[in-house]
Amino acid sequence: ASALARRAAPALTQRRNFIAGSEEYGKHCFKGAVADAYLAKHGLPAGLLDDPSWTTTSADKVAAAVMDWAHDNGASVMTHWFQPMASLGVRHGQTGQVHNAMFTFDKDGKVEWELEGKALLKGETDGSSYPSGGMRATHTAGGYTVIDPTSPIFLRGDTVFVPTIFVSFYGDALDEKTPLMRAQKAVSTQATRLLKLLGYGVDKVGPNIGLEQEFFLVPRKDYYRRPDLQLTGRTIMGKNAPRGQEMCDHYMAAINPVALECMQEIQHECFMLGIPLRTRHREVAPNQYEFAPFFGTAVTQIDQNLMVMQICDEVAARHGLACLPQEKPFKDINGSGKHNNIS
């Protein structure tokens, strides 16, 4: 490993106007041409990441390629990124992560870059505070992360995010992704069996989804005056607004300039991460908006949707706004859906 030569981490977004340039799409996502360029430097073929078997044959070289890519983009930290049970609506981003700097010391005490394949593939952390953790014996209360090779690695700021599952010592799911992947496998097994009986030879069957994201943008100064919004994501007291959505005049109207600037920055960040947010518009309720992406595989779409919600929250704060993705934040006006489009 070469000596540590830390580069300054870039800002989370380089420009606010969407789209800056097609060449920037997926620049911060280790997939396709972006990944292939770095894999080639380590003697690995293009398209290697399309086959999950790389985790058993080329993990060390892939890890070295990821580290090179990270350094070129100012990142020096890695985290396994998972979706713990019971986090919905409770934690920021709804995900779990422990950040580790990618360096070690040589025999002379000199700092060196290092990211080994085993560190990329799996990790161990404290699982005792997750659901049922207190019911397990102390020596089996750990939580274990294992890479999900079907969902691409990405980076934000100085940190590389590696999508993973999260299980207990005995392999019980401590996250939301493991049950989904097990369900997909079961559906694929039975669907391929059925199709073969009908005369169609297929290797696997998988679901595609396209998750819209509707949300409200409200002034942050007013958000801070509402403890119910801050603690629950919705209003639970008070009177209705004097005017609602009686005329539906908000739907698909011109976007408020303050909201538009915020939405442009959100789209730009997502564009860099390879998240294809194609559509933006006003929704039916006052101050309600929507993003809609191209569809993709279910696991990747859910990963991307979680990151979209986190980016919306963080970018809105930078614009003096609060983003409310909760399903029904206000009484007697439309709630926010997450419609599944694949057309």
Image (cartoon, grey):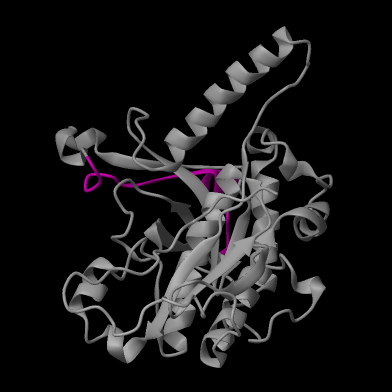
Q: Is residue 129 magenta?
A: yes
Q: Is residue 30 visible?
A: yes
In the picture, measured across the screen, residue 312 lies left or right of residue 15, that is left
Q: Quadrant of residue 171?
A: top left
The magenta stretch spans residue 167: no
Residue 186, position in %: x, y?
Answer: 53, 22
- Furthest toward the top, the residue is 197
Q: Nearer the viewer, residue 89 or 107?
A: 89
Residue 20 image-quadrant placement: bottom right
In the rendered view, would you say 121 is above or below 258?
A: above
Depth check, front residue: 47 or 231: 231
- For the record, the magenta segment spans 113-131
Residue 10 shows in the view: no
State the image quarter where residue 59 is shown: top right
Q: Is residue 102 above or below residue 15?
A: above
Residue at 63 percent of width and 20 percent of height = 191
The answer to whether residue 122 is left or right of residue 150 is left
- The residue sitting at 40% across, 57% down in the picture is 95
Residue, x 29% and y 88% (percent of image)? 222
Query: Residue 170: x and y, percent?
Result: 33, 27
Q: Position of residue 296 (x, y in %)?
A: 66, 48
* Quarter of the picture holding the N terminus: bottom right
Q: How many marks?
A: 0
